[in-house]
Amino acid sequence: MKTHPVPIFGSPVSLAFSLVVATGLLTPGLVAAAGRSSSSDLSIVRDPGTGNLKLSWTGGGTLKQSRTLDGTFKPVRARGRSHQFAPVEDQLIFSLESASPIFSVNIVGYINTTIPPGLSLIANQLWNQDNSVALLINSPADGTQVYKYVEGAGYEVSTFDATSQTWSNPDMTLTPGIGFFYRNPTSQTIVNTFVGEVRTGTLVNRLPAGFSTEGAIIPQLLSLSEHLIPGEPGDVVRLYVNDGQGNEDYVTSVFSETEGTWVPNLMLGVGQGFISERAHAVDWVRVFTVN
């Protein structure tokens, strides 16, 4: 299969997000926490001035947090129905719990993505009402560029101008499931904090035939096969490693007819994008529910 030319490469990322979830095969009509009598929704926002995060919620319940994938949710000291904090922990997610039939129908959190100098291939995996580059990218340096591949059209580009504090294409959308390239023009490693809601239920990411840049909708550190990325013999997945020392290169996995899986079965991290090269379009389906 011919490799489509790409302008930049992606990097591994440092992540600060973990969740308690159940994953499995497609279950038509699956609804998270079905059968409860009422709900309380959580929301999370980032203050662009301070970088602090604010949680707020409707209804009742106790705010709880967990730092590990299968950890125990512990109560958070919060006054009223809001909680402000700095995103300094390595892993945090939030939910609402109550002895009464009140529960949070969503889970929210943040992902700290470490981006070294040069070029990185990353993904936003948390949903917001506004998934534009202008909202999602925190305090970019002058000359920062984001490249989003559009099927049949090539790369859509947005460049940040520090003088005017604007993006050349501020409405570029970076929704969960899209991989995109990030150019860090500085000599320093930076951290971008993505905040939002984890998507639940039956999640479908359409992988087109040919070349595309993709990302997992569910923020988990798993192998390609554990992510249930579909493949046919000869299909290719490419990750890119940027070690922050000027060394950047592709790492490639091919779907093997003999093995019936991806070889090698690379690990795809939280917040990491990848290149997909495939003969036929296919739906990449995951089911994600909250325990």
Image (cartoon, rainbow, N blue to C red):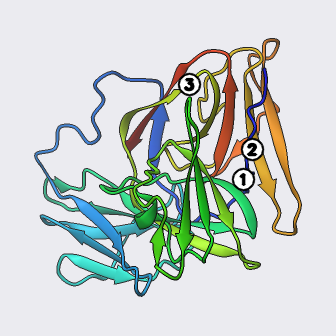
What secondary structure is marked by label 3? loop
Which residue is painted at 40% across and 68% down in the image?
A: 65
Q: Earlier in the sequence, mark 2 or mark 1?
A: 1
Q: Please state the horizontal and vertical placement of residue 241, each as a whole percent of the image.
A: 80, 53
Q: Nearer the viewer, mark 2 or mark 3?
A: 3
Which residue is painted at 29% across and 79% down in the image?
A: 83
Q: Please state the horizontal and vertical placement of residue 282, each as a whole percent of the image.
A: 54, 19
Quarter in which the N terminus is drawn: top right
Distance in Å between CA atoms under marks 2 and 1: 7 Å
Distance in Å between CA atoms under marks 3 and 1: 20 Å
What secondary structure is marked by label 2? strand
- What residue type is disc 2 on? Leu
Residue at numbered disc 2: 239
Residue at numbered disc 3: 208
Q: Nearer the viewer, residue 221 or 14?
A: 14
- What residue type is disc 3 on? Pro
Left or right of 35? Residue 5 is right
